[in-house]
Every structure is written in structure tokens, then in C-alpha cells.
Amino acid sequence: MDNLKKLIHGSSGIGLGNGVGAIRYTNYKKSTDKVYMASRKKKKGEFRIPGKISGIDKNKTGLKIRFQNEIELEIKFLDSNLVRTTWTPGDLPVPYAMSDKEWGDINVQIKQKDDSWMISSDTLSLQVHPCGSISYFENEKSIRHDNPPRLEGKSWALTSDLKKEAKIFGMGEQANKFDLRGSSMELWNTDPGGSYKLNEGPLYMPMPVYYCLDSNGGHLIFHENSYKGTISFEEEVKASFMGGALRTYFIAGDIKDVIVIFTELTGRASLPPHWALGFHQSRWGYKNEADIRRIAKGYQDNQLPLSCIHMDIDYMDAYRVFTIDKERYPDLKKLSGEMEEQGIKLVTILDPAVKIDKEYDVFMEGLKNGYFCKGSDGHLMRGLVWSGWSAFPDFTNPDTRNWWKSKYPLLLDEGIAGIWHDMNEPASFVSDGDPTLPFSTLHDLDGKQGDHLEAHNLYGLNMSRAGHESLKEHRPEKRPWLLTRSGWVGIQRYAWHWTADIESSWEALRMTVSGLLNLGISGVSHSGSDIGGFSGMANTELFIRWFQLAGFTPFFRNHSSHHTPDSEPWEYGPEAVAIIRASLRVRERLLPYIYTSSWQAAEFGYPLMRPMFWDDQDDEALLNIEDCYFFGDHLLVAPVMVEGQTEKEVYFPKGTWIDFYDGSIYTGGQIHTIKISIEKIPLFVRSGAVIPTIEDGSRILNLYISNNSTEKTISIIYSDEGEGYGASKQEEFIVVGELDRIIINRKVSGKYPLPTNSGLRIIGVEAKSVKIDGRAIDVGEKTIIKSKFEKILIKV
Ligand code: MIG
């Protein structure tokens, strides 16, 4: 009942009519699910383990091992450090998570050793024991052990050893601390309904992907199985899935190397348009054109840079997707043009569900062509959302995807720059229980056919795939930009992600850092959270701290729920506005650096937010840190996430670190106590880094270096037009410190023209003299130099 109250009046606020519908829908779903689950139920005590090995088929990249109890294990090496194991029976997955990379043939050695079989590449070995357990070795060192799996009815269950000290990261989106050891997680994309807090789950986008780090090193596991399931990390790892084959990918190594291989497998984000890295203002809901103009003006009047405004569900006509409310938005095209002139893009929300309405062409087309999800007896499956009773496109059907793709031009033609996918778990209003479609709902699964237990977690991924492909197809000269609430492994190929309806609390702010770091380790390079939290009203201090942190997350957006007071920066008073302005300007200044980090995500799969152990996982002190992180290669962010905090203890990785704002020096490998002010987020730069900024329209190369830096540091700057697919340029700066001098070598590739001049700023040392390509120059606070050079020599 509490749930129902919240649903009708509270943070979800769906109103009385929908509330009554939700009760009806819930009863329907519950009874349908009960019947369906009973039909799949295993007999009591019915389970199978592999039994003894009964036969072997070798091939070039691996082998198949048959076991007595009609169970088969296939082992296939895709690369020397990427191996796939598949236990059957069970349907093989449709490869939605996978990139289109074709893996070549790699030679493996297969040997019999006593009763077991060893399958090895140059770096990895798998030993399959006669009972079906598997030991994994990296260069002879044992790093993992799986027990023989169990098949219970249609569900596979696997347990694996976990060392005492092992830490676990990843698992897609979680409302958790950073290290997931000790947690049990459900694999079922879920709308928590208007507000969630720490330890609530599952959320919109859990994933069966984790990185395990222990005293023998690290490895990544990806279970390519989309079925409803659970994974827990207590004494041991327990993973189970309600159907399908048990297919698992294994990659060994340090996080940085593992992420490269994992994102080769599951794909990488495409390079975003430059504007997407700017600041976004959103709200549920701006009511009409005047409201949008008011926001743009507010930003201008307060001298706050703004890149984009998001339009929530209120722009639609009665919440019908691919329509525009002509009374509220009589001329959206004109509005978007006006905004464009001010450098502001417009993004519209898009829900998947289509209102059941005979007068509505989108619904009638979908119905006529069989594009919607159906129940097991072929009836149209209904759910309840903002538009009322609605049908759900089956995005696992290629025809549905093509049809859906053909609709985006309706928004693009109005000048909409990017699309925001919501409610695509998919979500339906319920009075209690699981807020989605019944388990028995049928899906095409690209011709394979299957039920909702299998297809549910793939819904947001395939909707986003359609959206991404549509933007590419219908606006080929521009880069697609989409935001999605739900998805699955590989979602980074199609869309960015945000953590949606998070509560407005300090605890939620802290959870944001852990959550976004774990998303990054799961392959999702670009994500963010609603500034100030979604469901409540942050006090001024929390709002400021959240704002400052969000400036160092990939997706930088202010958004809040419809029942909260207005939450644009000026609502918090002039002092807050001044601080927020400064934080927006730091973001703006750093855009060339952040853009380069986005390019690295596209190129190598590196997330923008990286855990403190990213460069050094041998330093145990770094493994547990969840209140600091790296943003890109060289920025160490130490956000303030405790109310009223005046000092923060920061453990710096080995090396030397320089305060971003005042150039003071911190020696790494130890804890420093940092003084905190409300004005800024503590920020440090790796000594030896070249950080590009843009200031008053000019490009500045900021060399952060201290006297005692002797290590070689490499910095990359990637530049291009910021949109489209034209020329680009990559500059590589190699900085080496010697006793009394610093040498910077610059290598360049690509054709994109840089500005003739750049500024050079040296922070952290007093330069006695500076020579560029052999010619002495005077250095001041910010010296103008030719952008084209090969070598800088600094005497200190
Ligand atoms: O049922 O579109 O997470 O960002 O403002 C709520 C209205 C639907 C949930 C999203 C939120 C958005 C809201 N949506």
C-alpha cells in the first residue's frame, strides 16, 4: 500500500487513474508470472552436474569436451588473452553484446595431463579436471578456479573460488560501494520507481561483468547470458541464470589492459559531438517554448555557459512518442534554430511504449505489422506508462528496429540534436512487485524466439541500437548522441548512460563516484548523474558539491523530478551562482583535455573516470579508494562528499602531484591532508603532464612539472572539428625530467590544422630559461608560442 501511495501521489506521481490501472496490471502480471514460472519449474531435486569426461573433439582454437551426463563444454580462444567457455545444453546467446570484430584463428596447444586436459595459448592455460571443474592459469600462475557447474531445470549455476583478499568491481550499474565483495546482485534491469538510495537494487542496468583483483593479479569475467539471474560475491562467487547456455569470457591482466580487450569484444563508444561534453540543463518538466527561452536567458543573464537543454515528456502530445504538443511547442523548429544561434542544443526524451489508441498512426502501424510484444497466446501485451495503456515495441525484432529507426527524423527535422531514451528496462507502472512486462512475453530475438526472462535485459540495448543507427543514417554528417537509462553489456556503442532517479543526499553523492567507476569497469565509458539528485531538493551545499563533482564526470547535467522546486543554479542564490560559474568555467577550460579523454574511450575503451589503481595495482593502498579517482590520464579528483567537511585525507599514488589551482606540490605514496573550501573541488595534476585548455578562445598548453619529477610522462591531445568525420590531429608530448632540466618532445600525426599560436604555461617549477626548437624565449605567466614545435628545453 505504501508503494501505491508513492506511485499515485509521491515521487512517481502517476495520478489516480493510472494508479487504479496499475493495480489491475499488477494483478495480471502476478498471475501470469505464476502460471509461467510453474510451467518451467524443475522437479524437486532435479539437477545435473557434468559427470566424467566421455569424449573430446579438438579443433584449431580449442576443443569440445563431452561429459557423461549429456553436458558439453566448449573452450575457444579468441585471442591469446581472451578465452570463451560455453556449457550446454541451453540456447546460445544472440550476440547483441558483441562488437562486429572478427577474431582470427589463434593457435592453442591441447595436452592431456593425468586425467585432465590443458588448453593453452602463449599466456593463458585452462585445465579442465575430470569432474568438469576448470583452473585458469596466467603464465603458470593459478588465478581462478571454477567448480563443476550445475544445471537445475533450465538454469545454470556456477560457483568459483574467491581469495580472502579478493576485491570485485564492475557489475554495470549498482547502488553500492565501490568494492562489491560481500554483495549479492540481481541481474534484472529495473526501474526502482522515482527514487533510490544506497544498497537498493537492482537498478536500470546491472551487468554480468566483473573484475576480480587479488594477490595473484586481476581478471575479468563476462557471462554472455542475458537471462534473469543473480551473482553474489561472498565466501565464493555464485552466479546463476534462469536459462540459456552458460557462456563466459575470461581475460587476465591489469585493469587497463583488460578493458582494452573487453571493449574490443563488446565495442567502444563512438566519438561524441563536442557539445555533448558541455553542460546540460534539464528538468521534468519544462512546460512550453517560453520555459525553454527562460532557461536559456537565465543562463545568459547569469553568465553561465550552457551547451544543451533537455526536454522531458511534456513536449509530447499526451505522452505519445514521436509527437509534439503543438499548443506548448507551436514551432519547435524555430525554437531550436533560435537556441542554435545561442550555441544551445536541444535534446528530447523518448520512451519506448506506444499509446494504445486507434487514432494514433504510430500505434496502428506497429499493430498492423506485428512490431509489438505479444503474450504467449499471441495477444498484444499491454503495460501502463505515462501515456496510459500502451504497447511495447519488440526491439529484438529487426523489422521493429527498422520501423522505429524510420521515426527519429520527426524529431531531427525539428532541429533536435540528441535523444534521451527513458523507461527502457522496459518499465511499466505497478502497485507493487516487478515493474515490467510479464515473464511469458514473447520476443523475436532476431529470429531465435524467446521469452521475457531472456529478452528483458536486452530491451534498452536494442532500443538504443535502433536510435543510434537511425541518427547515423538520417543525419550522416553529424555524430549521433544518445542518452539511455537502461541497456546491457555493449551499451557504450550506442549511448551514454545516467544513473537516473537517485535520491538527493550526501550518501547518494558518494555512491555516485563508486557507481560511475564500476560502470566504467563494465565498459561504459560515458556516464553521469542528476546534479543535486533527482528525487528531492538538495540544500545549497549539497547542490554545489554535486555540481563540482559532476564537472568531473563525462555527462554533466542538472536534472530533477517534477515534484521538486526549481533547481537551476540561480535558485540557490548569488553566492552559489558564483561558485557554480567558476565550476562551469573550469569544465569549459578543460574541454580539450576532456575531449581527448573521450577520444581515448572511442579508441581504447578507457572510461573517462578511472579508479585510483588504474596505473598501479601493485600499491595496495590504492585498491580501496572510493572517494578519489582519475579523470582522464592526468587529473586526480578528490571531490568533497561530506557535509561541512573542512579537510580531506588524500592518498596520492607514487610520483609527484601538483595542485591544479595554485601549483603546490604533493609527494605521492603517502597521505596528505588537504584543506577544503566551498569554492572548489580539490584537483591535482600528475607531474610531467601537458594539459590543454581553452581560455578566451586561445589554446594553452599547461605544463605541470616539479623539480623532482624524473619519470617519463606521456600526454596526448586529440583535436578535430568537434562534429562530423573530418580531419583530426594527435599530438603526443613526452616529458622527461633530469637533474636541472626538463625536456619535452612533441610528435604529431594527422591533418587537422591547429591554431598558429598556443599559450605555454609552466606550473610547479621556476624556469630559469626556456628554449623552443633551440631558440630561447622569455616565459611569463602565459607565453605565446608557435603551435608547431618539436622540442622544448627548460632549465630549472
Ligand atoms: O516515470 O520522464 O529517470 O529522469 O524525468 C518517470 C520523467 C519517468 C524517469 C527518468 C527521469 C524523468 C522521468 N522519467
Image: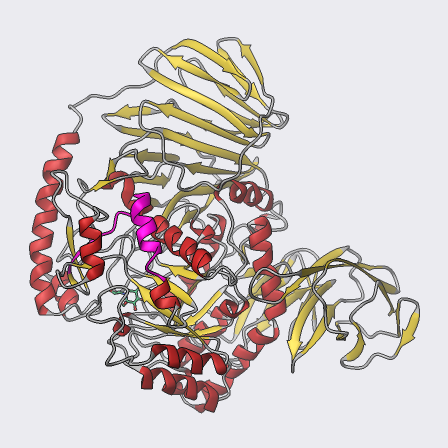
Residue 190 in sight from this viewpoint: yes
Q: Position of residue 331 (x, y in %)?
A: 33, 80
Query: Residue placed at 22% from the left, 52% from the top?
Result: 366
Counting from the top left corner in percent of width and height, residue 527 is at 45, 60
**In this rendering, position of residue 693 left or right of residue 171:** right
Ligand 1, image quadrant it occupies: bottom left
Which image quarter is the C terminus in?
A: bottom right
Residue 83 placement (x, y as % from top left): 51, 29
Find residue 398 and report its image quarter: top left
Q: Quadrant of residue 378?
A: top left
| Left-right relation of 257 to 699 | left
Q: Is residue 393 magenta?
A: yes
Nearest the camera: 473 or 195?
A: 473
Using the rendered image of the protein, determine whether residue 133 is visible from the camera's viewpoint.
Answer: no
Q: Which residues are magenta?
A: 389-408
Does 47 sit left or right of 682 as displayed?
A: left
Instruction: Reply yes or no: does residue 362 show up in magenta.
Output: no
Give above or below for 786 relative to 579: above
Q: Is residue 289 left or right of residue 699?
A: left
Camera-nearest residue between 634 and 598: 598
* Residue occupying the point 66% across, 56% down: 669
Vertical comparison of 638 with 372: above or below? below
Q: Nearer the viewer, residue 746 or 328?
A: 328
